[in-house]
Image (tube, rainbow, N blue to C red):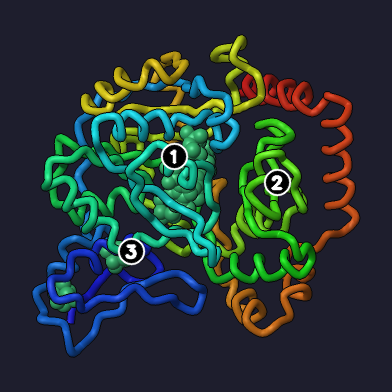
Amino acid sequence: MPILVDSDHCCGCAACANKCPNHAIIMQGNEEGFLHPLVSVEKCIECKVCEQVCPGLNPIKRKNSFPHAYIVQHKDDAIRRQSTSGGAFTAIATAILNKGGVVFGATMMEDYTVRHQSAHSIEELERFRNSKYVQSEIGCSYQEALCYLEDGRWVCFSGTPCQINGLYSFLGKDYSNLITVDFSCRAVPSPFVFLKYVEYRKKQQNEARRIVFRDKKRGYSYSTLAWYANEADQKNGNSVYRKSSEADEWLRLFLGGLCNRSSCNACFYQTPQRYSDFTLWDCWDVKSLAPEWDDNHGTTNVVVWSEKGLRMMDEMKSDIRYREYPFDQAKRAIVRTSSFTTRRNNHQFYVDVKSMDVADFFHKYAPTNVKVKSLSLGRYVMWRLHLHDKIRRIRHLFIHRKK
Ligand SMILES: Cc1cc2nc3c(=O)[nH]c(=O)nc-3n(C[C@H](O)[C@H](O)[C@H](O)COP(=O)(O)OP(=O)(O)OC[C@H]3O[C@@H](n4cnc5c(N)ncnc54)[C@H](O)[C@@H]3O)c2cc1C
Ligand code: SF4
Ligand code: SF4
Ligand code: SF4
């Protein structure tokens, strides 16, 4: 039987399952709700191909690259508002579709699982926009991408850095018609605990149907997790629930590192050089890089790692505003920082999530106490008084001066 990377370091990329020639591996949820490979003794022919493609056992070699750093805003304001930050991902994906290509990204499904799917038209890109703070299931998408690549179609594949490493391990080489997009990744939280959060939310707000993790109704700097009853309400911004990171139960569990995947604890995919063509992340200091762009609708930091990526940037230029800045300034955000830690030894947490009533569970692990209520109210009042963004800018200025 093959020996794959130990479960604490398995990122769940599913390269092993996609590559197994005898379909002997299925990805199965563990006790924390994360997918891990399960090898069938009956089907396994001991070829060890899965071991060879596991990025946890064989880290892929970094490209020699000459990175370029930019800040980017999509020119279409509606797209930018739907996106997490500045909509750079949509501009890259659109350039691929314009070449007759296919785009892979993470979609929130009706059953509230997040899965990688393919898109073939500009309209379909909407479901990829905005971060889903739950681990996405790769399914068979690496195999599907390979078919398109071998057919000579352009492919854009987006995902977490470990998923992009998994894709390259699975492919075994780079393709001239492949563009990969990853991001600066804090961690991915448990899909199983997320379903408990959905159950809890629906008990509190029974009209809640559609979730947006980074809604910009109150602006980019005060983004909120919002639930809507239907698509029309979402378009009008009429939410049934809206809370920010200091108050929403799910964001507090995620940002507090309570239910993140153990591989995120010692993530070795976020190195000073990436294998991807593009790395994206939030730009909070647009004021210092391009003051005239600071409209609080969002800006993406983009690093382009490859010649291919630079050519793609050229093809995107009619859709975006962009400005280059020294790569050295970007390095800090690309390398994983120790502040993004995952709490471990949280055995009791997982015992409780399975045994407790959902309301009791969330009251225990993310209580809405006086401190939370005061912080939330204070932030809301600042926003109503148009002081929220000013205070954030002053804080940023102060932090940057100190650095
Ligand atoms: C789990 C997660 C953690 C992140 N952590 C940070 C962080 O700590 N700091 C930071 O600056 N930025 C982080 N980001 C990235 C950031 O939120 C934006 O994705 C990035 O700024 C690009 O924004 P955009 O407006 O250009 O694209 P968007 O339109 O927001 O594009 C979103 C892209 O992300 C992909 N995506 C969304 N959810 C998932 C998922 N669950 N798994 C895999 N791919 C997904 C989509 O397929 C799409 O390609 C994180 C994103 C995710 C999904
Ligand atoms: S050793 Fe070969 S057959 Fe067995 S699980 Fe791995 S890839 Fe599949
Ligand atoms: S290939 Fe990916 S999913 Fe499979 S064992 Fe390795 S890290 Fe885990
Ligand atoms: S933190 Fe690292 S291991 Fe965790 S999802 Fe992100 S890239 Fe993968």
Nearer the observer, 148 or 344 = 148
Q: Is residue 122 above or below residue 114?
A: above
Comparing labels 2 and 3, the label whose residue is closer to the camera: 2
Image point 74% across, 61% down: which residue? 207
Q: CA distance from mark 2 to mark 3?
A: 31 Å
Please give the residue where the numbered disc 1 appears in the rendered image. 123
> Is the residue marked by circle 1 packed among few (<14), some (14-19), or many (20+) residues within 10 Å?
few
Quarter containing the C terminus: top right
Q: CA distance from mark 2 to mark 1?
A: 19 Å
Q: Hey, what amino acid is under mark 3? A: Gly
Where residue 163 sits: x, y (%)? 34, 53
Comparing labels 3 and 1, the label whose residue is closer to the camera: 1
Please give the residue where the numbered disc 2 appears in the rendered image. 233
Nearer the observer, 36 or 56 = 36
Report the disc number at residue 232: none
Q: Is residue 199 above or below residue 328?
A: below
Pointer 2 or 3: first along the chain: 3
Q: Quadrant of residue 302?
A: top left
Q: Is residue 279 above or below residue 363?
A: above
Please give the residue where the numbered disc 3 appears in the rendered image. 139
Image point 40% across, 62% down: which residue? 137
Where residue 37 sits: x, y (%)? 31, 73
Image point 33% across, 64% down: which residue? 139
Q: Hey, what amino acid is under mark 2? A: Asp
Q: CA distance from mark 3 to mark 1?
A: 23 Å
Q: Quadrant of residue 325?
A: top left
Quarter containing the N terminus: bottom left
Res 269 visible: no
